[in-house]
Amino acid sequence: MNVAITGAAGTVGREALLALCGHEVTPITHRDHDELEGPTLDVTDREAFADALDGQDALVHLAGNASPDADWDGVFESNIGGTHNAYEAARRNDLDRVVFASSNHAVQMHNVADPAEPESMREEARAVRPDDPTRPDSYYGVSKVAAEALGDFYADRHGIEVVNLRIGWLMDEEELRETQTADESDAARRFARAMWLSPGDCREVIQRAVDADLPESPVVAHAISWNDDRYLSLTETMRKLDYRPRDDSAEIIEG
């Protein structure tokens, strides 16, 4: 299968490249990187985006402004407009599937400890399933909700297989331990433990999102590790994508 990855030079993008090494992968980046051979483009350039997907079967769309602190202008064109361009490019090139990098921030307000601090989590967090109403915690979260809706539209109107993958917080083990320092609030430490996505689990869930036989489309799936502190349900990701997470933030921190 020919798979294009936008944002291939980013943290999640690097894991996606490893996850999909069994496919013919085309990395798409915002600027040149010596070690990555592929198109460079701005996702707001619709024609360039369409040209870049020529001959592709699937797209993993990771590009965009990834900051929960971004203002409206910072997410509108890249995250909403750019995702619209991604789906238009997929439609024009008859791609079979788009895996969209959504975020836990699309639903984080369900359990935020302090609305002014999106990356915090209250103690008695309620479970959140993919079919629960979205509750974004920031303009970034709003942009992900809007982009998920675009995916729903293109799945229903144009028959593209769509996976809206709500990605947690990708960190290695040392970075996870650093979030548990005394400088962070209890609510912030709790959020990190709940949202941790290990590199290995990240590769697993992306590979499954690309390769799994989908029972329906669109699919909304949570992408975090098997954390004791999680509130995002993984049942649907496991059933619909055959995802089998292996790592738990509690074991890393306590170990």
Image: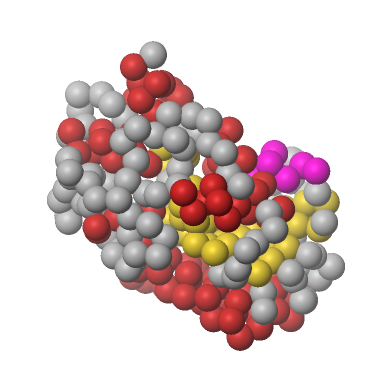
Tell me: residue 35, above or below residue 45: above
Looking at the magenta stretch, what is its main secondary structure?
helix
In the image, taking residue 48 as reference, residue 56 lies left or right, namely: right
- Residue 156 appears anywhere in the view: yes
Q: Please tell me whether residue 202 belongs to the stretch shown in magenta.
A: no
Q: Is residue 19 above or below residue 142?
A: above
Please tell me whether residue 15 belongs to the stretch shown in magenta.
yes
Residue depicted at x 62% and y 63%: 215
Residue 57, image x and y in percent? 78, 65
Instruction: Name the image quarter holding the C terminus.
Output: top left
Taking the spot 48% from the left edge, 71% from the top edge, the residue there is 147
Can residue 38 be seen at all in this image of the molecule?
Answer: no
Q: Is residue 60 left or right of residue 3?
A: left
Query: Of all residues shown, which one is farthest toward the bottom?
Result: 157
- What colour scheme has been applied to the protein in the rendered image? secondary structure
User: Can you say which quadrant of the picture contains the N terminus?
Assistant: bottom right
Task: Please report the residue visible at 68 percent of the width from the left and 41 percent of the height from the top.
Answer: 19
Q: Tally the marks.
A: 0
Residue placed most toward the observer, 185 or 49: 185
Q: Residue furthest top?
A: 255
The image quadrant that residue 69 belongs to is: bottom left
Tell me: residue 119, above or below residue 152.
above
Q: Is residue 34 left or right of residue 77?
A: right
Give x and y (percent) for residue 165.
52, 56
At 77% from the left and 76% from the top, the residue drawn is 93
Q: Position of residue 212 (x, y in %)?
A: 68, 54
Residue stretch rendered in magenta on the structure: 14-22
Residue 131 locus on image (x, y percent):
40, 65
